[in-house]
Amino acid sequence: MLIGLILFPLIFSLMIFILPKNLTKYATIFYSVFSLSWMGMVVKNISSWTNPFFTENYVFSSNLPSSLLLVLDGISLIPILLTQLLIALILWMLLANQKEDKSTYSLIALMHFGLNGVFLCADALGFYIFWEVTLIPIYFICAIWGEGKRMPITLKFFLYTFIGSLCMLVSFLYLYQIQPEGGNFSIANIFNVDMSATARFLVALGIFIGLAVKIPIFGFHNWQADTYTSAPFYGSMLLAGIMLKMGLYGMYRWLSPVFAGPLCCDLQWYIIILCIIGVVYGAIIAITQTDLKRILAFSSFSHVGLIAAGIMTFSHSGWQGGLLQMFVHGLNIVGLFYIVNLIEQKYGSRDLNKLGGIATQNKWLAIYGMILVLGTTALPLTNGFPGEFLLLKSMFEYQFLTALFAGTTIIWCAVYMLRLYQKVFFGEESKLVLSGDSSLSSIEHFILIIFVLGVLVLGIFPQLILGLSESTVLNYLTQK
Amino acid sequence: MEKYFYLVILFPLIGFLVNGLLGSKMKGTTPGLIGTVAVFIPFLIALGVFFNYGHESQPILQNYFPWINIFDFQANFSILIDPLSLQMTLIITGIGSLIHLYSIGYMHDDEGFARFFSYLNLFIFSMLLLVLGSNLLILFIGWEGVGLCSYLLIGFWYKNEDYGYAARKAFVMNRIGDLGLIAGIVLLWSYFKTIEFQAMAIHAANVDMSDPVIIIATLCLFIGAIGKSAQIPLYTWLPDAMAGPTPVSALIHAATMVTAGIYLLVRAHFLFDLAPSVLNLVSYVGIATSIFAAIIALRQNDIKKVLAYSTVSQLGLMFVALGVGAYTTAMFHVTTHAFFKALLFLGAGSVIHALHGEQDIRNMGGLKNEIKSTYWVFLIGTLAICGIFPLSGMFSKDEILTVLFEKSKGLWALSLFSSLLTAVYMFRLLFLTFFGTYRDDEHKKSKIHESPMVMMAPLWVLAILSVFGGILNLPHLIGGESYGKMAHFLDPIFSHSKLATEHMDAGLEIGLMALVVGLVVIIGFVLYNIYVKKESLPKPDMSLRGVEALVANKFGVDELYDTVISKPVLGISRFFGQKVESAFDGISGFFFVAGFKSIGNSLRKIQNGNVEFYLILMTGSIVVLMILQFLIKI
Amino acid sequence: MSVIIVILLTAILVLFLHIFEGRQWVNPLAILGLSLSFIILCLENNSLWGDYSSMIYMTQFAKVFTGTAIIFTILVFFINQSRLKLEEDTNNGDKLGLVLFSLCGAILLFTFTNITMLFLGIEILSIPLYVIASSSKHDLHSNEAGLKYFLMGSFATSIILFGMALIFGATNSLDIMTISEYFSQAEISKMAALGAFFVGIGFFFKVAAIPFHFWTPDVYEGTPSIWATYFATVVKIASFGAFFRLYILLGNVDNSPLYKVLVLIIILTVVVGTLTALVQENAKRMIAYSSIVNSGFLLMFFLNPSSDILSYFGLFILGYGLATIGIFSAIVYLESIGNSNGFEGFDGLGRSQPLFSLGVAICLLSLAGIPLTVGFLGKFYLLMSLSFDQWWMILLVIASSIISIVYYFRIFNGMYFSNKKASAIVAPEVVSPYLNFVVGFCALSLIIIGLFPDFYLNIFQ
């Protein structure tokens, strides 16, 4: 069941090379629909919502103290759902753009493979391996199809993440080594150890750095804006939409158990502070940026800071809000990147100062854009609100003044998002816009409507997502 | 009837969707009619419910579905029908439908006709959610929703960048308040473990006075109210919001949205009652805003700006009333204010419409002969807001003053001052606009025309309401047995309230009333003398000096905010975005790589290709290693 | 033993065939002979202690290393085959013969049980190499490389010999078991310790650990790439095989006369090697330094030897060897079409030869230690073998791995992300099927063993 989620992307990724070029399109459509329906089947077969829903174990090597242990519970279900959905959407976007390069599809499928692995694997070594595997396709995607100074930027990105993940690996190795004889890397064993407070702190720090680079958290974020800007649009989507969730997911699964015992210093508090600084810092920078992708990059940086902070409170509403917001952020940021991509495609620029008045020219694009912008600014009845509210709630309950500081995000977000919207869609039509192509193809409509529906439906029924993880989160937190 | 109450919310939403999705394909005024009907039907339903709602009726809680339902937070999507929400619903849908009707005429040749109505409907929808929501979170949906609609409507003519800026300013200012509201909601949740109004009210009965959590929570709620109801220091968005089409100003910035803050305080009165210090703050902020805005209004020359500042000032008065615990009184003023301010704004709209977009009163004058009907309704509005007997404004304002006179003489004097200022700027506006002679060129004069019937009808309805609105809540003195209808209606809401008001001495009441009316009349005559008889005109902006210039320039608050907040934020943003980020770049891998490379380059020099050198180096290394291994003990 | 005989016979046959106008059959014959020897190796039982006069002893460890060395040599010959298509080489038979002889030396190094055999092995391994290094007769660089290699190699050999003499003097025996027993005592004589020290120094030279590495970059660069491949892989594996065995035999670890030196040299090797590799402008030199860094990693396995470590050590060296061969095939291809050895020579390769460069890319990823490859597993086991008391070693591995990304990815970047169009490459010729086979074999093995390491690791048991 779960192994399918890992195997099919891998098979597709290899298959597409062999298939003749004219079949790429159909194969991709088939693949995306198939992976979605497979996911649907997995969800349908969940018999009880007490965790975990499914566990599968495949032993690869008797020499490795590790196996392919796949676990699906409420916490992994949400990012997994997001991954299936976004990968399918990204593939459709590529088809809509008539991108013909086979290797793109293959790399995205490889990415899919790695991502599903990261979210499913409950074995520290396996998790780490999948974690690294995702790095390769995204490196290729950014470096081959990127723009600007893509080489140094992509290398910077790669180095940052690689440094981070090696720190994480060291922590895992340590956790493994201090186990009594016959231990292994499975999540049940690896955290079931006695450590001194200092060791615990160092282990937590190592894992945190690995996750923090991916998320990114303030101080580890320098790669992000450059990479998002120079990456091709689907690269930015994969990075912001899904890869970033790897870090957040890691906080639930791999970081929080370390905090079960006493640490030699208040790491939880420091992490929250960093997150919160990032929330405000990113948002403030976003105010004066002029490149649409950069704005989205900093916006995303700001938003995930809040999610990470909420998770770090280890409170029920923080965790539930975080999971919901993970899903929602993925949906919204990918939708916005898609709109930016459409704008760039049709009008030839993503510079705020060169755009303007698209609302007159392309009404539907403006409407879709407005809804996604509102979703991002967390207006009630859009999907951004319930999660952000729960996160802020957890923050307020954790520390009132910090939360107030973090809460200013709702103000900043309104400032830069509305500025963005104003400059792009409102005002007089700029030269570029006047000469641009104003039509949306039906597949573009279709894709955008999915995003818009996501914004509205989840805004009105956030319970659709919250309900999936409720019992798991409850169990997880009460056990601690 | 109550069973179908969800239609009240649903209809405007449907209207929004229909107009928004299909409106551009419809012909003529169809979108306008759809929009109007979508608000009028809810009005009828609400009216039906209202007449069924007796004094003994229990509040009706309608639960639709759980919105957010997790272990440590629950908020249902549910509405609460009680006198307070019913009254607000009636105001919103009633005045709302009039404004919709008016807009059909006002906006008829605008290219965004359908879009306009879809926004208006969305606004009504949000506003209804705001007042009907049974818990703070549903209220918050409406709260932010009206903020959004106000953003959309202020920036309705989106090609104009300035309007866009005003719209964003409104939204952002509102958001500042919203943060306070969210904080308040969370605090209340963690205190009561519920955010349902009814449940909270029950729990609140057992809470000690001046409980610190309650104080902070109410303070937070009040910050929210400040943002939405445009009080100091977050008022600057409201005058700028006049960039929107005039019906918008009437609907949002006079009759409904800005009263949301008042509504919130009234709705959560059981909490504010527990926090007397916050209540004091409320009245101080209110009175300060009221006078401050009134003074600014004295020197404004844009017809809509004057009305905007007047709104801020009136809202201030309502907060003063709330601050002394006179919730019903505040609600009464909300209602009458909705009547005459909508009337004034729509009247102003009619003037602007007649003059083809002219808004500066220095370019008007003598319009009472040109557009008679508009003149009459505007006159009624002016008299009502000034508080001339027996128009509605007089009753509500008088009630506020009476209450204040009892509670605090100081507040009373300041409020009196504020309402006299109201008379000053309103009469100034009236005289400059309608009296004297037309001051712009003749060519324009020939084009002046009266507004069509579809605009005038709502004006007359509002005029009638402005005249007779007082009947809703007559003082005991005048109304006899049928006094205080609204107070009685709202009474069940405040049954928990510990600050019930009492009747005062009749003689004193008459005296106060007479004093106010008398002073207003005197002001009217003085101003008539100045502006009509002597025909003196406001000076051009350039020639103003000193205090006058300061007032005309709105005390420079906008500029102050610009220098104190906007510019530093932008500066910080650039500093972070360029300097700090590149510093990070410097510390990041690149720096290391560059550093490593320079070390590497110097190490590379050892590899010079000379075998002798290599051999010497190796031999040297062997010696060193031998020493290390055998002679040094570590 | 029969393996060595088969290889020797092949070598002699090759030499003869070369004389008797059968040049085109020389290379296939060598490959055939090696394959035969590999099969024999697989079928042969492990020898017993005391066979062959207690001179050589085929353990499972030796068997795996011998097999690996044979396979690497076969791959090198395949690369050589691709060269023969393009150019007439009248001396091919000589070179192959020499390589095969040196391979025999390598096998002796895995199997010796007597230090005279060790010495013989080193010499049999090395002497043909000196000739091969200068085999490109008309190339000054090649001649220089040969000479340098010879001079420094003999220097090292003499040091080893000196060490052996001291050991013999102290223990009065040449038999490895006797010596080992002597060294496991709590107290050993100064003489024996000094002997072990010198033997160690000699091997540090052979495995190219800093500061005894000077020959490596120059020799790799000067030697024709095909034979440099052999140097970088088979010679490396042979030296390490011998050194590791010797190191375990020569004493309990903490007390080892080499421990402190080892630690210092590891640090030097990894740090200096990594930093110098970072600034290289030539792919071959970069690989040379990368091989130095990898020597540093391999030396880390010496710190905590145990029976498990043996197989992890083998896995690491296998990953290193396969990846290096893959990258060298790319260098050979680029040389054959006239591109320079600089990184810019790789520009656009990804577009002109997608499949070939995919293989090369996998080799690079493996060297960089990215998961799903043997390279990752090797590093993983290396980290596992280090205890957390040696945290600075772990730090070293991590830091070096990170920086290595930068220089491995320079080839990567050239292949895939260069702005040059594919057509800009001089004569985008078809890659010979032999090279394709070699790269494909390396890449696939790296992935397959990376996914299922058991298949390899279990052979050690």
Image (cartoon, rainbow, N blue to C red):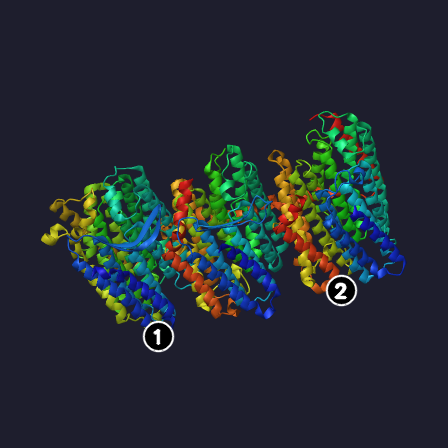
From this view, report whether residue A361 is shown above or below residue A239. below
Of badges 2 and 1, nearer the viewer stands 2
Letter of the chain that mark 1 sits on in the rendering: B
Q: Is residue A220 shown above or below A460?
A: above
State left or right for residue B24 relative to residue A435.
left
- The kind of secondary structure element at disc 2 is loop
The three-letter code of the residue at mark 2 reads: Ala
Dot 1 surroundings within 10 Å: few (below 14), some, or many (20 or more)? few
- Mark 2: give few (<14), some (14-19) or many (20+) Cα within 10 Å: few
Check if mark 2 and mark 1 are on a common chain: no
Judged from this view, the residue extending furthest toward the left is B481
Residue A309 location, quadrant: top left
Choose top left, top right, bottom left or bottom right for residue B442.
bottom left
Q: Which residue is mark 2?
A: C427
Asked which secondary structure carries label 1, the reply is: loop
Q: In this image, B336 relative to C260: left or right?
A: left
For residue B27, the mark is 1
- Return the residue nearer the eye: B309 or B143: B143
Q: Is residue C294 above or below residue B127?
A: above
Give the amino acid at mark 1. Answer: Lys
At which x and y percent is residue A171?
56, 40
Instruction: Tell me where residue B104 appears, x and y as whole percent.
Output: 31, 69
Of the 4 image quadrants, the one containing the C terminus of chain B is top right
User: In the image, residue A114 lies at what x, y percent?
Assistant: 55, 54
Decide: is C316 above or below B470: above
Residue B229 visible here: no
B211 or C240, which lies in front? C240
